[in-house]
Amino acid sequence: MEDPKKLEEGFGNQKNNISEENIDTNRIDNNQDLASHENEKKILSQPLQKEEEEQPTIKKGKRVATLDAFRGLTIVLMILVDDAGGAYARIDHSPWNGCTLADFVMPFFLFIVGVAIALALKRVPKVSAAIRKVTLRTLKLLFWGIILQGGYSHAPDDLAYGVDMKVIRWCGILQRIALVYLIVALIEILTTKLRPTTLTPAHFSIFTAYKWQWLGGFVAFVVYMTTLYGLYVPDWNFLEHDGDTSQRYTVKCGMRGHLGPACNAVGYVDRQVWGINHLYNQPVWARSKACTLSYPETGPFRDNAPTWCRAPFEPEGLLSSISAIMSGTIGIHYGHVLIHFKGHGERLKQWISMGFGLLIIAFILHFSDAIPLNKQLYSFSYVCFTAGAAGIVFSGFYILIDVLGMRIPFLWLEWIGMNAVLIFVMGAQGIFAGFINGWYFKNEDNNLVNWIQHHVFFDVWKSQRLGTLLYVIFAEITFWAVLAGILHRLGIYWKL
């Protein structure tokens, strides 16, 4: 599982001008979608040539405010659970079954990536060019993911850099986003000529119009469920290194369909594909009741702790990332609704009904013990629960920002959402803090970041837990919000 200091990642796109060939996440005309409903309907009903003739009449440079605010909220949650989760274990990732605040971050990002893909690929004049752009962005995400979470970067606590290729971690947050983005975007591009520009009055027309996208999500579901319950997991072993010594442990399995930490197919696939030395070596299951008396916080292992408590596990592995494609599929559906339904009421009816429907499915699966909520496995109930929650939150933002016009209180979230990549790399991955820590006095611990933490927050509030929370809120989240606002004012955005 994720290092509490290196948690969920961000995906944002920052460019001022809309382009039909741009695979940037959310360049469409906000006024066109939210105000000029009849004009947009007329444009969408015309042939492609007519669409291109009408294009100069569309004002460019606007963004969907709700999309940016939702992305900004997700990044704020990411920073909060990354840096305050160690002090407040209840908001950190669930050790196994269940869902905490931290467990919403990854699926929220995949959801909003799906929404953004629908808007960015609303029209695809040239399929080959669109595929090249999607492929290039995927490669960029993979590259940055390996650099930031593969072990090369040791920021912010360690001022060294470099990684032993024998233990490099191949999977990670940006790598999962890259896979979901690639699959969902390619389906959207390759089915451009198969989807209608206008919907029929049928009740489920929004689903049948994009049947290929839903088919892609269904294929991911079948592959995941078939492998999860059908793959035989044999006994396996691993080495635990302690300085110059090492000890070998064996985990007894020999079963199928197990959803516990030790013998699930998700872990087995990753051990076979990547190799056990290339998996995340600090999984959150070490905080479980079976492993430590300090549950839900980190602590020493029990004397009789199972051997798997010490084993590595990849939370962003291959099979679980295939399941994550469903989060992107649900997100792109919300984007399609935004495109085709022009009235606020129509959009909200579609969004909210689906959101609550997914939540009901998740509750039934979880509380019946059929398929428990589990972020590490990216279980189907977890997909439904987090996607349903994302849909409800997205709808709430839409009501407040775009329907009621309460945009000012959420501007800081929009600013953060516009520079999501910058804040993820520099903030959540500790690159900026590492840079500051590099300027120390006499010893590495005597730096500005530690001085602010101890003298401004810990000592003043007489509590390390409360001081940590306030430090994250005021010295990190507020700092990045102000910086993002300044960069937005200057028209500076960092995109991949």
Image (cartoon, helix red, strand yellow):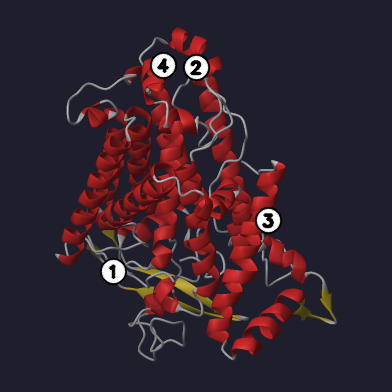
- Residue 385: which numbered mark, if any? none
Q: Which residue is mark 1?
A: 260
How many numbered marks appear?
4
Rendered location of residue 340, percent (x, y): 33, 28
Q: Residues within 10 Å of mark 1 (few under 14, many from 20)?
A: few
Residue shown at the point (25%, 57%) measured from the top left: 381
Q: CA distance from mark 3 to mark 4?
A: 38 Å
Q: Which residue is mark 3?
A: 483
Q: Residues within 10 Å of mark 4 (few under 14, many from 20)?
A: some
Q: CA distance from mark 1 to mark 4?
A: 53 Å
Asked whether disc 4 touches disc 2, contact meaning CB atoms under 8 Å apart, the reply is: no
Q: CA distance from mark 2 to mark 1?
A: 48 Å
Q: Is residue 26 left or right of residue 373?
A: right
Asked whether 489 or 306 is in front, the reply is: 489
Closer to viewer: mark 2 or mark 1: 2
Q: Is residue 420 left or right of residue 371?
A: right
Asked whether disc 3 touches disc 4, contact meaning CB atoms under 8 Å apart, the reply is: no
Up the image or down, 4 lies above or below 388; here it is: below
Residue shown at the point (64%, 52%) measured from the top left: 484
Q: Secondary structure at mark 3?
A: helix
Of pointers 3 and 2, the one earlier in the residue sequence: 2
Q: Amino acid at mark 3?
A: Leu
Q: Amino acid at mark 4?
A: Ile
Of pointers 1 and 4, the one earlier in the residue sequence: 4
Residue shown at the point (37%, 55%) measured from the top left: 269
Q: Is residue 190 left or right of residue 206?
A: right
Q: CA distance from mark 3 to mark 2?
A: 36 Å
Of pointers 3 and 4, the one earlier in the residue sequence: 4
Asked whether disc 3 touches disc 1, contact meaning CB atoms under 8 Å apart, the reply is: no
Of pointers 3 and 1, the one earlier in the residue sequence: 1
Q: CA distance from mark 4 to mark 2?
A: 15 Å
